[in-house]
Amino acid sequence: MSAPFSDQQELIDFLVNKGNGVTGLSQMGLSSLPQHFIQPPEARLALGAPNLLSQDSIPIIDASNWDHPNIGKSICEAAENWGFFQIINHGIPFEVLEGVKAAGHRFFELPVEERRKWIKENSPTHTVQLMTSLSPLAVKVLEWKDYLFHIYDSKDESSQLWPSVSKDQVLEYMKWVQPVIRKLLDILLKGLNVEEMDEAKKSSLMGTLMVNLIYYPKCPNPELTAGAGPHADISSITILLQDDVGGLYVRAPQGDGWIHVPPMKGALVINIGDILQIMSNGRYKSIEHRVIVNSKRNRISVPVFVNPSPDAVIGPLPQVVERGEKALYKQVVYSDYFNYFFSKGHEGKHTIEYAKI
């Protein structure tokens, strides 16, 4: 069947206000994609066009011995040269990784009457919310995804109000991923001559943890749309757990090509966000990435966005610029940067221009 929507407002009402999301569209068995999801030809990732695809692969780092100097060297080099890398043997049990992915599937397989309990108007707490696309009221072309967004704080009891089908697995995953986050940030800071992460730096780098269960349902015309358009994250770092479906592409360091990041069993994908690019004064690179969707399988990914506190003031670290290096970025309040990013659609690396001097 074709999409039964006469205009974008009717579609937005179905997706957002009624809580159906893209999942509801996919479950209708559409034969063709609604017009509002169709990317202009120049914005599509044409998998048949060799010039758009790179044969490179991002670094894979064995983190079985975090304290070995070669591990730190490899991580900092990957952050400088690639902005993306995968880590294996990171210490998080395989069953914890599988559990949180299965929890994502369980949530999005709920009837819409259950899912819509978590849209903004209905959710019992601001720390969990069901969302669709990216800023659907602000963009011209919608993205083919839904996501259950969580703000995580181990001391906040509101997490007990999260959906029962996924709550325990999300909380267990967050318990295990936090030491990995801390180790990565410690290593990356030492690469910038910062020996200790005091409370101010902790607030600047990891004051807010957000974890999403992102669902990319089967799509009738995946070549015409995007699960996520080209963008760079506005985090310090992002820790991504992806399932075995695949679909993540990263901008190649040289040229305009895109590198596929194939799923690896038990691996985590790490990428540098804009905040660490700003704090490192451009030494570490926040890199564009994008997601394509699939006509045959539903895909789950679980990113943890390691963000500053909303009131944190972000700028190049003194240790980076104290020896005369010219600051490339001004001081910005993180909440202003965050709101600017979500005021528009995905626009590649455009957001960081907001902080440039």
Image (spheres, rainbow, N blue to C red):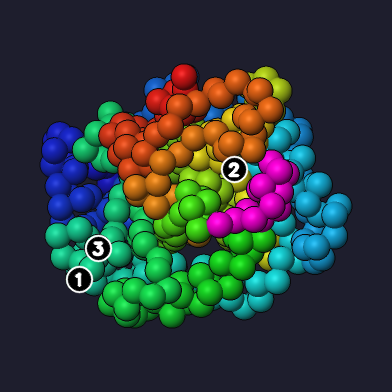
Q: Position of residue 69 (x, y in %)?
A: 85, 54
**Mark closer to the chain start, 3 or 2:** 3
Residue 64 position by quadrant: bottom right
Which stretch appears magenta? 184-198
Q: Residue 272 bears which disc, if any?
A: 2
Tell me the kind of residue under disc 3: His
Q: In this view, does 110 lie above or below 291?
A: below
Disc 1 on helix, strand or loop? loop
Calculate the distance from the C-alpha at mark 1 to the C-alpha at mark 2: 33 Å
Q: Where is residue 197 in the image (x, y as percent from the top left)?
A: 59, 56
Q: Residue 126 bears which disc, if any?
A: 3
Q: Which of 241/262 is in front?
A: 241
Q: Name the residue under label 1.
A: 124
As for residue 185 lying within the magenta part, the answer is yes
Disc 3 on helix, strand or loop? loop
Q: Are marks 1 and 3 in contact (CB under 8 Å)?
A: no
Tell me the kind of residue under disc 2: Ile
Q: Residue at x 20, y 50 (%)?
A: 16
In the rendered image, is residue 293 in sight?
Answer: no
Q: Which of 235/23 is in front?
A: 235
Left or right: residue 158 versus residue 218 is: left
Left or right: residue 70 versus residue 115 is: right
Count all numbered tags in the image, as a single digit: 3
